[in-house]
Structure formats: structure tokens, C-alpha cells
Amino acid sequence: MEGCLRLAECWLDMEAKERERLVWQCPNIVVLCIDSYGRQQQKGRFYHQYMAGPVCFSSLIAAFKQMDDFYDEIAFPYPSVRMRSFFVDRNAVGQVLTEGQKQMEYKRKDRVKMETFHDVAGHRGDDATFVIRVQYRQHASWQGEVTWIDGQKKEYFRSALELVRLIDGALCEKGEAAGR
């Protein structure tokens, strides 16, 4: 019985180490640094491993658009929904998608890591810092996990709207704690 307990403890330790290693290698992690946050305007920057330097934004919507473009560039997580149009020839679309799928397969391989995970995770925002890992892009939205570094909380989200609500809730909670 003691041997089984030791084996289980070793397995749990190994799983934690393996999980930590996988996070370092995860290409879709973004560190969102919010420098100023208001109801009308949110300013900040985000970092990822494939760019040496920040991507600046002036609203959360702009940040999410830039993040979505980044996910399209690295083709990860792969989107389950594609943009459609009434003005494009359907036969041409079928050919483009087939060629596009082949091209998307190699996009991530062409990207070179510019910063280590530790460098990216070391950035901090003036108001708040969030580590966002989008695991899936299904149902025309995002699913994943967000970690609020300052509040030391981790939550899962099922849509980009829920992610906005979690970020807003964290910042409102921080403002109430500071007596704003």
C-alpha cells in the first residue's frame, strides 16, 4: 500500500512538472498588461513569444482583434468557423480553402520565438496583468483560461464576452479594494 502511495505522489509531481513544461511551449499564451482602465477606454499592451516587444492597444476590443489576428497567423488554436461572403464564387472558395489549409499547417513552423516564456511572463501592467491562454476557437468565440496575476486568481471562460466580464470584474474588484 505504501508503494502505491509513493507511486501516486511521484506521478502527481511528474504531472505537475510536465504541465509546467507544456505551458512554456504553448504558443497561444498572451500576457495582457493593462496600464489604464476606464469604462470608455482601456489602454495597455500584450506580449507573446513570437514578437520581441509589445503590441499596444487602446481598447479591449482592439486587443482582442489583434490577438485573434495573431492566432490566425500562427494557426493555433485553429478556428472552427471561417468568414463567409455572398460575393465570392463558391467553387473558387473551395479551392482557396484547400490551399489555405495546407498553408496554415506550416505557418506556425515558420514562426520563430523571439522571447522566452519567462521573459514574456515577466511583463506587468500599471493597473493589472492577465495571462490568457485561448485553448479553443469554437462557435465563433474563444474558450480558455485567464489568470489574474495581481489577484492570484485563475478562471475559465467560455466566450470572449465572458473573458471581458472576468477582466472587468477583476479590475472593479481591485478598484474597490483600493477605495476608488
Image (tube, grey):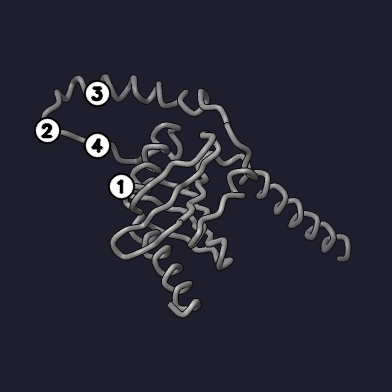
Query: What residue did someone put label 4 on?
Result: 83
Residue 35 on image: x %, y %: 45, 57
Quarter placement of the C terminus: bottom left
Marks 4 and 1 sit apart, C-alpha to C-alpha, by 10 Å
Instruction: Report helix, strand or loop for mark 2.
Output: loop
Q: Residues within 10 Å of mark 4 (few under 14, many from 20)?
A: few
Indicate the amino acid at tag 2.
Phe
Q: Residues within 10 Å of mark 1 (few under 14, many from 20)?
A: few
> In the picture shown, does residue 103 fall above or below 141?
above
Indicate the amino acid at tag 1.
Ala
Indicate the amino acid at tag 4.
Met
The residue at the point 47 percent across, 46 percent down is 46
Marks 2 and 4 sit apart, C-alpha to C-alpha, by 11 Å
Task: Say which label, 1 or 3, has the lower sequence index.
Answer: 3
Q: Quadrant of the rendered structure where residue 74 is?
A: top left
* Mark number, residue 140: 1
Instruction: Report helix, strand or loop for mark 3.
Output: helix
Marks 3 and 2 sit apart, C-alpha to C-alpha, by 14 Å
Label 3 or label 2, whichever lies nearer to me, is 2
Query: What residue did someone put label 3 on?
Result: 94
> In the picture shown, does residue 48 fall above or below 113?
below
Marks 1 and 3 sit apart, C-alpha to C-alpha, by 20 Å
Indicate the amino acid at tag 3.
Gly
Instruction: Report helix, strand or loop for mark 4.
Output: loop
Query: What residue did someone put label 2 on?
Result: 86
> In the picture shown, does residue 106 fall above or below 28?
above
Task: Say which label, 4 or 1, has the lower sequence index.
Answer: 4
The residue at the point 41 percent across, 59 percent down is 36
Q: Residues within 10 Å of mark 3 (few under 14, many from 20)?
A: few
Task: Say which label, 2 or 1, has the lower sequence index.
Answer: 2
